[in-house]
Image: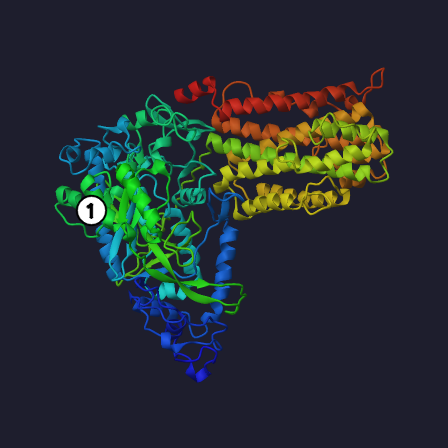
Amino acid sequence: MTNPNDRLLPTDLPESAAQLAAALAPTAAAGHFDELRGAAAPARTAPTDRIAGATSAPISIANNQGLSRPWADFFEQLGPEGFPDLDRRMASLQRQVRDNGITYNVYADADGPQRPWSVDLFPLILSQHDWALIERGVLQRARLLDRVMADVYGPQELLRTGLLPSALVQGHPGYLRPMHGVQPVGGTHLPIAAFDMARDAQGGWWVVTQRTQAPSGLGYLLENRLLISRLFPEAFSQMHVQRLAATYRALLDGLRQMSPAGADARIVLLTPGPYNETYFEHAYLARYLGLTLVEGNDLTVRDARLYLKTLHGLQPVHGILKRLDDEFLDPLELRSDSRLGVPGLLQAIRAGNVLVANAPGSAFLESSAMLGFMPALSRHLLGEELALPSLPTWWCGEHAAQQAVLPQLPHSVIRPTWPSLQRPPVLGGTLSPQDLARWTERIQGQGDEYTVQAYLPLSQMPTWRTEGGGGNGGGGSHIAPRSVMLRVFAVCDGPGSWRVLPGGLARIATDEREIASMQRGGSSADVWVQTDGPVDTTTLLAHNQSAPAVVHRSRQVTSRAAENLFWLGRYTERTENVTRLARIALQCLNGEDQSSQPLLAWLSTLAVGQGLVLPSVPPATQARRVFERSLIAGLTQPALVTSVGYNLRGILGAASAVRDRLSQEHWHLIVSTEAEFFAQRPNGNGGTDDGDYSPLEALRQLETLSGRTAAMTGQQTDRMTRDDGWRLLSIGRHLERLGFLAAALEGGLQTGAVFDESGFEAMTGLFDSTITFHAQYQQRRDMPALLDLLVIDRDNPRSLAWVAQTLRGRIAKIEAAAGTPGESAATGIPEASELSLATLCAQDAEGRYAALEQYLGACVRGVMGLSDLLATRYFTHSADALRHSVGA
């Protein structure tokens, strides 16, 4: 054997990239199938040395074994200099994941639910021979599961004859009695089914689990494909990898064909919301398929028909692609505490008015115990043996199975039968004799709660590990085998017909453990299925690419999306307003103007009115430093509903709910701004909360935040489609701006700050109009000049007249499009054009600007009334608006 401390001379290097990969890559662990080499792994020899540059790595040629043909082709496409470039590609992959905002929410993560999606650099490659077997077996199982569902919710012959135990089916919490006797629209219970498979040491495939409620992965595998195919374009093209788009198109066409409305069906994707673990893929999949992404409160049932709540009233819904577990679907008939579903949905399903993929009630099929009954069910229902065998499985609720399997526990996996138990699988081989005895006793006492499966060492695929290194293949980068499980999807392309997605989602175990779970820190990989025939080039673009006519279809804006966009605008403007106010206050408290009593009184009143300082805090006129400490301390308090931090969290929350409408840059800006603001708390000790504070540090932090909120405004202005959703966002912004600026000017009059030179400057600064004022009026410091610019100037986007005019225009367009009857919502917003500058500047006998104060008060009151009216008309759908919509 070559001494691992000796470096090979250039003449000793393998002649090809495939040979180099074979030399560098350790074999799989003994007893596992080696995907890289296409054979069972022998006892592993000493590990090969890691790459330290492709032309200078110490390599142990004794470990060189030939690669399988697909993997040899893959590495040959890297070229002779391909290995040093793998670190760069890995860095590019990780950067793209971050830039695209691909996340997977982990419920158990104490540091926050979101983490970047984990995907490996190398794909799992399947030959056409392997895929032909998988495809045949998956199609068979999809038909079989659908037949089982039809029987269990129909004649129940399988239960009467004992082919399925009643306790396992009807005792399962996922068996839904309200669905018994219901024939699904289109006649197919399971338009989508997913199967987790593993390969044994001899290369045979086994089904380990089956997913039927709301199988996840269809969105993530698409993203994986886009990422990896772009990093290895030569290999992807030359290896004839089958494409995915045709299957997604077939799924859409199949759902429309089976729905009550046929080709004109409106189909939505139902998500639990932004806090679900796979929410990213819900938004991504909806965008890719062209479906409306909805949550439960976006939908309503009227007269056993399902409707989508939109700005234009209620629109009929004919199909649901659901990503919500069955028990949460309808609080009237299932879980009464569910806030994720739609009251009355099961009634609409029973009436045959809506297609749901998948039909509610399939959860019992996901129990591990079901796998043990599949061979007999296949023979009875299909007259066929299973093409893909199930992993040997015993449900311990049957006495004979329990007695047969107990002696096999050291070589098995113990799984919970019911999902409510929420227990992780237990590897019998890891248990001590005492633990085995305890498990034996537990199974004997509560056998129905446990299912035992044979232990199958997962096959291992090559992965690329960059441990502490930079680019150019340095820093310990190496190929490492990791256990992998494959999830494959069957989708319905018409009544009683399925096709298999030519690819899938590979889940890779962490380190060398056998747990391939994303929730437990695992990774994923793209799946390349090779074909000897032509590669399908179908896309989701229009069928007839030469057709010159394009029918413009406005995007539906749901009431929930509209409300979140409205609040996204409000929170963004609030953040900008209170940030500017806090900056001006800190500058004045630490500058030459700190002796101006009217200015301090105005800032104190405004800060309390905006919630930046509690009313119990002494004003700045009495205790400047106490006031300043309270102002700084409150900036980052997320529990204080008017703090800067709370508003930033509000932006993030509203944006999360409408993420499918935001550009990647916009979303990334929101996430990074919120994270950095709380990571750099404005005090003197790097974020520790020990009572110390630093006005200068707070000012720097606020200045940074001002720049970022300005960038958010730019994204909202220039990167979003001008539909009714955007108009609601703009209305939210201008509603906040009008109320804030009117209250600020009103307070300036009441405290006399606008009559003080320092207060005058602070007022123009708060209106973000200082430069404009000095350019137009130079050194003037009088009320006519101030009111002309800040109140009635139609060219100043910060003037009250401009804001009110814009607000009225946005509302008018929404009302015209929605056909909103009755008085306009903008009636309460006063029109500044009705007031002349002379009228605004007129003073009464007491020296008060009565007309101006009346106008400012009307602005503040009008904003409050407008917010309530918009919610009633477009978000909550009050009774009057609802009757109008249904009648239309």
Picture quadrant of residue 347 = top left
Depth check: give the residue in front, 505 or 565.
Answer: 505
Return the residue at label 1.
404
Picture quadrant of residue 825 = top right
Q: In this rendering, would 294 be left or right of 492? A: right
Can residue 254 be seen?
no
**Coordinates of residue 389 in the picture (x, y in percent):** 21, 51
Depth check: give the residue in front, 458 or 30.
Answer: 30
**Coordinates of residue 768 in the picture (x, y in percent):** 73, 38
Viewport quadrant of the C terminus: top left
Q: How is the image coloured?
A: rainbow
Assign a secondary structure to mark 1.
helix
Depth check: give the residue in front, 328 or 716.
Answer: 328
Picture quadrant of residue 165 = top left
Viewport quadrant of the N terminus: bottom left
Q: In this rendering, would 836 be left or right of 371? A: right
Q: In this rendering, would 26 be left or right of 111? A: left
**Coordinates of residue 634 in the picture (x, y in percent):** 69, 35
Depth check: give the residue in front, 139 or 556.
Answer: 139
- Callout 1, which amino acid? Ala
Q: Residue at x 69, y 25 (%)?
A: 833
Q: Is residue 104 above or below residue 34?
A: above
Q: In this rendering, would 184 be left or right of 237? A: left
Callout count: 1
Q: Is residue 34 above or below residue 360?
A: below
Residue density around tag 1, few if under 14, some if 14–19, many if 20 or more, within 10 Å: few
Q: Is residue 520 above or below residue 74?
A: above
Can residue 855 be seen?
yes
Find the residue positioned furthest to the top. Answer: 845
Find the residue positioned furthest to the front. Answer: 434
**Coordinates of residue 433 in the picture (x, y in percent):** 33, 50
